[in-house]
Amino acid sequence: MIQEKVTKQMSGWTMLIVVLAMIAVTILSFIQAISWIDQYMDSAGIPLLLFSILMIPTIIITARGFFTVEPNEGVVLLLFGKYKGTEKESGFRWANPFYSRKKISLRVRNFDSDKLKVNDKKGNPIMISAVVVWRVVDTAHAVFQVDDFEHYVRVQSESAVRHLASRYSYDDTEGEMLSLRSSIDEVSEGLKTEIQDRVDTAGVVVDEARINHLAYAPEIASAMLQRQQAEAIIDARTKIVDGAVGMVQMALNHLKEEGVIELDEERKANMVSNLMVVLCSDRATQPIINTGSLY
């Protein structure tokens, strides 16, 4: 694998002065050669004229070496297909005019993946997408190891999202420790690690990866909503019953300790039945006053 080699090229301003000097020398040489040939018909002016003519392509070729490097940008330099290094120092620079140059942005980038339809751990179809924040840290890998590093990162990220969704259930039902909906931080960290493993070849670092959209697929969304509502009702009823049993037990204990009334087993059963109806009913109970005996 080709490793990145950071090189420092010459200052463009220094070479600009050299090029301007070359232009000035060329103009003066051309004028002097024409003057000698015209006035003295001296053949000594011919070499000077040839020199000034040859300086023109030299200046043009030299001027091709100028380039600029913006902040958080790298320029990959190649000489006839051979990697020579990467210039990362921002500013006006000059390098061998025969170098071919490819600019690579080192800035932080992000993208929102398409909404993917995948099956979770239990086989339920879900819609999921993720936001991935990434940047290039090795320009040589980004240019030479993969064909198109931006497309490569996007494809590998979507592949990682698909694989992640198949490892977790949508919701934490039936004793699941982790789920896509309730364990956002753990799932996001796992997604980041998996994407990083896949894009190391491209010289890319993933700063953050987080699920951006998560929902059941439309064909089962209604059924799953009813299931969630049923589970919520069951959980609520369970808490109500637990609380009601505790309150009934507390009431019987208080009555016994205070000696308010002695209840036989039949009366206790009747009282427990009435209290449980009052406490567990989802509607307001209507009291009935007994004006006779308890029996």
Image (spheres, helix red, strand yellow):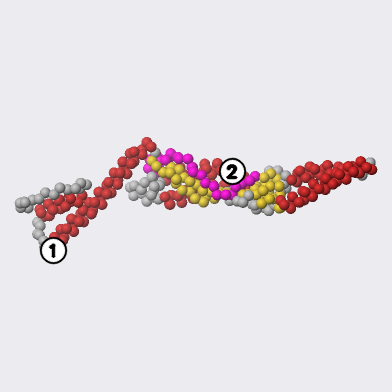
- The residue at which mark 1 appears reads as 258
**Do the numbered discs 2 and 1 sit on residues whose CB atoms are within 8 Å?**
no
**How far apart are labels 2 and 1 at the CA level?**
84 Å
Q: Which residues are magenta?
A: 102-127
Q: Which label sits on residue 146?
A: 2
Residue 124: give x, y in percent of width and height: 38, 40
Element assignment for label 1: helix
Mark sitting earlier along the chain (2/1): 2
Give the farthest residue toward the left. 292
Query: In which image quadrant can residue 53 be found?
Result: top right
Within 10 Å of disc 2 (Cα), the crowding (few <14, some 14-19, many 20+) is: some
Which residue is nearer to you in this view: 17 or 125? 17
Image-based side of 95 in relation to 22, left or right = left
Q: For residue 129, what is the image quadrant?
A: top left
Does 68 sit left or right of 262 as displayed? right
* Residue 58 sits in quarter: top right
For badge 1, the amino acid type reads Glu
Residue occupying the point 27% across, 49% down: 236
Residue 136 percent across, percent down from the top left = 57, 49
Residue in front for this viewpoint, 177 or 207: 207
Identity, as a three-letter code, of the amino acid under mark 2: Val
Looking at the picture, how far across and down is residue 101, in whole percent?
A: 67, 45
Residue 160 at least partly seen: no
Residue furthest out toward the top: 219
Rendering coords of residue 137 (x, y %): 58, 51
User: Is residue 107 left or right of 64 when viewed as pictured?
Assistant: left
